[in-house]
Image (tube, rainbow, N blue to C red):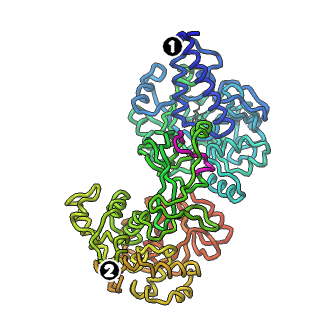
């Protein structure tokens, strides 16, 4: 049989619709979406195009309906007014043309509301009492989840003041990011799989069989629509403020815009705040403010004409995982790394992403040659979260860590009680790039401007070294032996850059003892051990000459660390590093750092507020930092504490004397509260830093 053009279109259309049904089920019911919103919208767009081309639109077409049919687990209710979806777009150009469309026509004001990524809910109040809560379902009928919703304290059981006999509102139930983090940590403690994101957290929580289970989940709510506004309410703005007077929470991140310019600035302003909010948003919803105008504009079967969602550029994408490479860390750990077909997410191009370890790769079913989902939230490092299509992935071979090191072909080993794989050869050349990277890091020799690619190139270069010590060519400090022309030949360098680099290297000779000890790259001799050593010894030479068993008497140094220090301090590679540094004038090797220089090196260059720091504001304290501190990385905050005599650690325990809480704190906050540990905010922390 030969297929006619229409048969062809029909087959494609059926296939696209089947895809939508499957993704609706995954998104709305299973809470396990496999594709990004963009890709979903793209399928819908293709269906629309074909429907226009063939002139045929089925009544059940996804271009007419929204969401997935309600699950049989709950009774259903027909919505008096369909709960429509929202048209969406991602560019200023499309937004401007929506503003110029017939139904909007730039008349009057607009509201700009943060589009929260949660689950839509319809609430009916009878005589001011909550009588019904229903999910959106397929837009026409939803699931009755009233009993579950009663366990969400943000949703009032009773409205305040005079209200009409029946009042219906719509809004979004969401899981705040902080609550999500705590909830996931608790799941992990119980050995349960973590949830992928707060949206799934909210959707799953609302649709629990047992209402007391919903009540245990951290859920919040914002109302955004008044279904039957009483007469005096004439605008969306007014509807929002009246709802909040009734006791229904509304989002303070709502702006009213008088014109196109203000609307575009509102979008930018909400997008700017995105990373600092305690909830996920995926765009801005613009609504015609005047309710009469809304009514006049009407709706299509799918979406209102008077509202639109301007979505942020996606933070989720799908791409091909070309291959899995093995990267070696400075202590020989072998990490699988995804090499991806370059993909843009939220304004950055992603080509590589760490895959952690073999167990994780297998658990997530990530396979080379398949399509994978990449996610990136705010400034968080991109992650490969799983296959785009598990069925397609299964046609590819499972990942297996090689049994020989790709760099030196030596055996790959595991360690008892630890996850991961290692190359056992301490002199494996594969360790060198990561060792150089660490040596130039801020806690070590602090040499700016040497990125990953340069580290690789330096590792591969032959340097003129002491012929008696071949290990010098395998030491990360060989960086100090590069000639000016070698520096100039590095990728991304050149004659001018080489001179700058040489100056920075010369300047790094004055780094304080703790930094130089850390730059030796000895396993388990971390920042805090190096600080303790620097407080007790005057030079690297003294530390090397010390009888290693003495270290065991120092606080925080147990047998494992002491043994690792003993091995490291006597290894050929570390000895070679020390000799290179000695020849190149690194002063702390022989203890030639004068107190003045140490003081200078200790000065904090991070923010202006902290310029006048002296000493000892955190003397004797053991501080834990949780949440995001504005404009600073956690490492910077911890460095400030160290410079003020305090110690830091990553978990709250009986030794903790103080908790510093930034934005979106994690479970450490609860732990500190339960242990009665003093807690200070970010502002109080900086006040203390500034105090005379
Ligand atoms: S208005 C007819 N306003 O986005 C207007 N929706 O893709 C429909 N959402 O189902 C909704 N924040 O779950 C509206 N301020 C807001 C919103 C919002 C989040 C969600 C809601 C809706 C979906 C549409």
84 to 188, vertically: above or below: above
Q: Which residue is drawn at 76% across and 30% down?
A: 76
Residue 234: which quarter of the image?
top right
Q: Position of residue 401 (x, y in %)?
A: 55, 55
**Residue bearing the label numbered 2:** 468
**Within the magenta stretch, is there residue 339?**
no
What is the number of the mark on residue 208?
none
Check residue 368 for magenta coloring.
yes
Q: Can residue 70 be seen in this view?
A: yes
Nearer to me, 113 or 421: 421
Q: In which quarter of the image is ligand 1?
A: top right
Foreground residue among 214 and 7: 7
Side (left or right) of 580 relative to 396 = left
Q: Which residue is drawn at 44% across and 41% down?
A: 341
> Percent from the top left, x then y, of residue 215?
74, 49
Q: In which quarter of the image is residue 538?
A: bottom left
The location of residue 653, given as percent across then percent down, is 63, 72
Q: Mark 1 points at which residue?
A: 53
In the displayed structure image, the side of residue 509 where residue 339 appears, left or right: right
Residue 293 appears in the figure: no
- Quadrant location, the N terminus: top right
> Magenta part of the protein: which range?
361-372
Q: Earlier in the sequence, mark 1 or mark 2?
A: 1
Give coordinates of residue 366: x percent, y percent.
Answer: 57, 46
User: Which is nearer the eye, 379 or 241?
Assistant: 379
Residue 222's place in the image compared with 98, above or below, is below
Measuring 43% from the left and 72% from the top, which residue is drawn there?
Answer: 690
Answer few, some or many: residues within 10 Å of disc 1's Cα (few below 14, many 20 plus, some between 14 and 19): few
The crowding category of the residue bearing disc 2, from other C-alpha atoms within 10 Å (few below 14, some 14 to 19, many at least 20), is few
In the depicted structure, whether residue 59 falls above or below residue 488 = above
How far is the residue under mark 1 from the one under mark 2? 79 Å
């Amino acid at each position: 049989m030969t297929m006619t053009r229409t048969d062809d279109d029909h087959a494609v259309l059926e296939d696209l619709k089947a895809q939508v049904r499957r993704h609706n089920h995954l998104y709305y019911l299973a809470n396990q979406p496999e594709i990004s919103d963009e890709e979903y919208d793209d399928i819908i767009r293709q269906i629309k195009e074909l429907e226009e081309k063939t002139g045929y639109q089925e009544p059940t077409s996804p271009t007419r309906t929204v969401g997935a049919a309600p699950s049989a687990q709950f009774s259903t209710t027909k919505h008096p007014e369909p709960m429509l979806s929202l048209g969406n777009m991602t560019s200023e150009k499309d937004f401007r043309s929506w503003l110029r469309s017939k139904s909007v026509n730039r008349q009057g004001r607009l509201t700009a509301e943060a589009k929260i990524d949660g689950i839509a809910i319809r609430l009916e109040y009878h005589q001011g009492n909550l009588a019904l809560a229903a999910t959106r379902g397929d837009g026409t009928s939803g699931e009755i989840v009233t009993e579950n919703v009663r366990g969400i304290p943000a949703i009032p059981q009773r409205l305040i003041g005079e209200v009409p006999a029946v009042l219906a509102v719509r809004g979004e139930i969401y899981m705040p990011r902080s609550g999500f983090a705590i909830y996931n940590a608790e799941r992990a403690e119980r050995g349960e799989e973590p949830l992928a994101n707060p949206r799934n957290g909210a959707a799953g929580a609302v649709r629990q069989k047992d209402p007391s289970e919903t009540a245990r989940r951290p859920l919040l709510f914002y109302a955004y629509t008044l279904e039957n506004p009483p007469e005096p309410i004439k605008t969306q703005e007014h509807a929002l403020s009246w709802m909040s007077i009734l006791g229904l929470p509304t989002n303070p991140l709502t702006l009213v815009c008088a014109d196109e310019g203000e609307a575009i600035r509102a979008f930018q302003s909400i997008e700017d705040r995105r990373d600092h909010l305690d909830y996920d948003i995926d765009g801005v919803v613009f609504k015609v403010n005047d309710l009469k105008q809304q009514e006049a504009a009407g709706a299509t079967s799918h979406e209102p004409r008077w509202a639109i969602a301007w979505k942020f550029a996606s933070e989720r994408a799908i791409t091909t995982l070309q291959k899995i490479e093995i990267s070696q860390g400075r202590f020989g750990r072998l990490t699988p790394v995804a090499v991806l077909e370059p993909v843009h997410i939220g304004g950055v191009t992603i080509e590589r992403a760490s895959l952690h370890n073999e167990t994780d790769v297998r658990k997530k079913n990530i396979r080379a040659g398949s399509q994978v989902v990449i996610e990136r939230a705010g400034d968080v490092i991109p992650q490969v979260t799983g296959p785009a299509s598990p069925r397609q992935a299964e046609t590819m071979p499972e990942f297996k860590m090689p049994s020989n090191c790709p760099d030196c072909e030596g055996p790959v080993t595991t360690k008892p009680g630890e996850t991961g794989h290692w190359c056992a050869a301490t002199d494996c050349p594969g360790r060198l790039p990561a060792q150089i990277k660490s040596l130039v890091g801020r806690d070590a020799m602090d040499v700016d401007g040497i990125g990953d690619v340069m580290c690789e190139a330096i590792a591969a270069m032959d340097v003129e070294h002491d012929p008696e010590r071949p290990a010098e060519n395998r030491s990360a400090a060989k960086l100090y032996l590069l000639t000016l022309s070698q520096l100039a030949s590095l990728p991304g360098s050149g004659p001018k850059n080489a001179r700058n680099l040489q100056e920075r290297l010369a300047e790094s000779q004055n780094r304080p003892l703790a930094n130089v000890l850390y730059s030796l790259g000895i396993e388990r001799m971390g920042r805090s051990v190096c600080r303790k050593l620097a407080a007790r010894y005057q030079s690297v030479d003294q530390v090397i000459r010390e009888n290693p068993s003495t270290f065991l008497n120092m606080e925080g140094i147990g047998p494992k660390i002491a043994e690792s220090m003993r091995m490291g301090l006597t290894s050929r590679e570390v000895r070679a590093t020390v000799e290179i540094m000695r020849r190149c004038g690194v002063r702390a090797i022989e203890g030639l750092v004068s107190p003045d220089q140490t003081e200078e090196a200790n000065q904090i260059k991070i923010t202006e507020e902290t310029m006048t720091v002296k000493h000892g504001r955190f003397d004797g304290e053991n501080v834990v930092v949780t949440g995001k501190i504005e404009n600073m990385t956690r490492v910077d905050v911890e460095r400030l504490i160290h410079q003020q005599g305090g110690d830091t650690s990553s978990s709250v325990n009986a030794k903790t004397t103080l908790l510093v809480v930034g934005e979106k704190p994690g479970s450490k906050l609860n732990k500190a509260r339960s242990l009665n540990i003093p807690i200070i905010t970010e502002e109080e922390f900086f006040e203390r830093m500034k105090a005379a």
